[in-house]
């Protein structure tokens, strides 16, 4: 990556920071660099395209797409956005397309519009290349996916009742969950999808991959709505350990967890909602 600016725009999140934009339960970040444009997740519908248009951005230049995991609220807009940029490279984990379900209040819901068994062939037919790997991958210069994240902590879990079968007998470890990280000149910027691997596992792994003891920013879904006090405290302790300067919890993090993190890091917590944007300097 050259020393140009990297701009990160939140195209879709559950809440909104600019009135002209709309929201949905989902997540999508646009990352613009001198070397190319990348979409990290695509929200639940085609809303990312409409919001980008309202911001004066065309997504036809997003030649790279990377998906954090197969859940509908991160992959639902993929096929629509591929119509605008059909020669795109799409990155994800090999388990991105497995069938999966969530149990909520004794009801079972499918959480997989793009992840149906058919989804893989459809996506393959509509992009330049579908690259599925559990390994870290450099998507653009200085911008990497983590690939599969080792689950090392004893206080983190996927954060919900996720299953691989409709009878809900086989727990879904959401092994495809990954994060994105950017090597900026200010430090490492981590962008989460839902962090089903656990936020601490994720930043521990990014630290290991980059051999950096500090993480400059962590943005995205932290999936902590059911987190215990101990888990919240351990998450905050990790942010202290890595000296995280910018903390932007959003999407599936949960209000209670965001309130707690704000109380612990009043000078570091930032809004990360639809329309928010961040700029970092690329590393030379
Ligand atoms: Fe999500
Ligand atoms: Fe998810």
Image: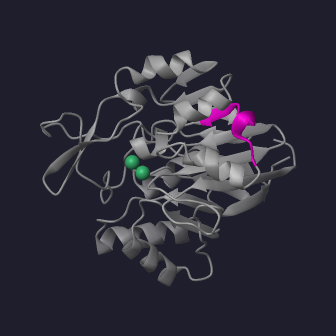
Position of 72 compared to 163: left or right?
right
**Residue depicted at 58% across the width and 68% down the height:** 247
- Counting from the top left corner in percent of width and height, residue 24 is at 47, 56
**Residue depicted at 60% across the width and 21% down the height:** 127
Position of 33 compared to 245: left or right?
right
Q: Is residue 152 visible?
A: yes
- Counting from the top left corner in percent of width and height, residue 63 is at 70, 31
Instruction: Choose top left, top right, bottom left or bottom right for residue 175.
Output: top left
Name the residue nearer the viewer: 148 or 225.
Answer: 225
Q: How many marks?
A: 0
- Tell me: residue 281, above or below residue 77: below
- Counting from the top left corner in percent of width and height, residue 10 is at 62, 56
- Counting from the top left corner in percent of width and height, residue 270 is at 61, 72
Q: Is residue 60 magenta?
A: yes
- Tell me: residue 70, above or below residue 187: above
Which image quarter is the N terminus in? top right
**Residue depicted at 56% across the width and 33% down the height:** 80
- Tell me: residue 17, above or below residue 25: below
Task: Report the span colored magenta.
Answer: 57-65
Q: Is residue 113 magenta?
A: no
Name the residue nearer the viewer: 279 or 213.
Answer: 279
Visual colour scheme: one colour
Name the residue nearer the viewer: 116 or 160.
Answer: 116
Instruction: Choose top left, top right, bottom left or bottom right for residue 34.
Output: top right
Q: Is residue 211 visible?
A: no
Position of 229 compared to 181: left or right?
left
């Amino acid at each position: 990556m050259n020393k140009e600016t990297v701009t990160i725009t939140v195209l879709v999140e559950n809440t909104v920071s600019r009135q002209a934009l709309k929201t949905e339960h989902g997540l999508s970040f646009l990352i613009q660099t001198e070397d190319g444009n990348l979409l990290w997740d695509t929200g639940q519908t085609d809303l990312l395209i409409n919001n980008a248009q309202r911001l004066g951005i065309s997504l036809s230049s997003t030649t790279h797409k990377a998906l954090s995991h197969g859940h509908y609220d991160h992959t639902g807009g993929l096929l629509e956005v591929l119509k605008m940029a059909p020669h795109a490279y799409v990155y994800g984990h090999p388990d991105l397309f497995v069938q999966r379900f969530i149990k909520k209040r004794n009801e079972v819901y499918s959480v997989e519009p793009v992840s149906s068994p058919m989804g893989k062939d459809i996506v393959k037919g509509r992009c330049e290349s579908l690259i599925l790997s559990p390994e870290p991958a450099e998507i653009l210069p200085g911008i990497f996916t983590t690939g599969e994240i080792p689950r090392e902590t004893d206080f983190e879990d996927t954060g919900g009742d996720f299953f691989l079968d409709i009878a809900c007998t086989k727990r879904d470890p959401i092994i495809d969950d990954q994060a994105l990280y950017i090597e900026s000149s200010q430090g490492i910027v981590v962008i989460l999808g839902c962090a089903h691997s656990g936020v601490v596992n994720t930043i521990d792994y990014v630290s290991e991959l980059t051999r950096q003891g500090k993480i400059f920013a962590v943005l995205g879904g932290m999936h902590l709505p059911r987190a215990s006090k101990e888990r919240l405290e351990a998450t905050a302790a990790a942010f202290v350990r890595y000296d995280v300067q910018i903390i932007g919890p959003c999407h599936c993090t949960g209000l209670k967890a965001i309130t707690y993190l704000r109380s612990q890091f009043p000078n570091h917590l930032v809004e990360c909602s639809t329309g928010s944007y961040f700029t970092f300097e690329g590393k030379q």
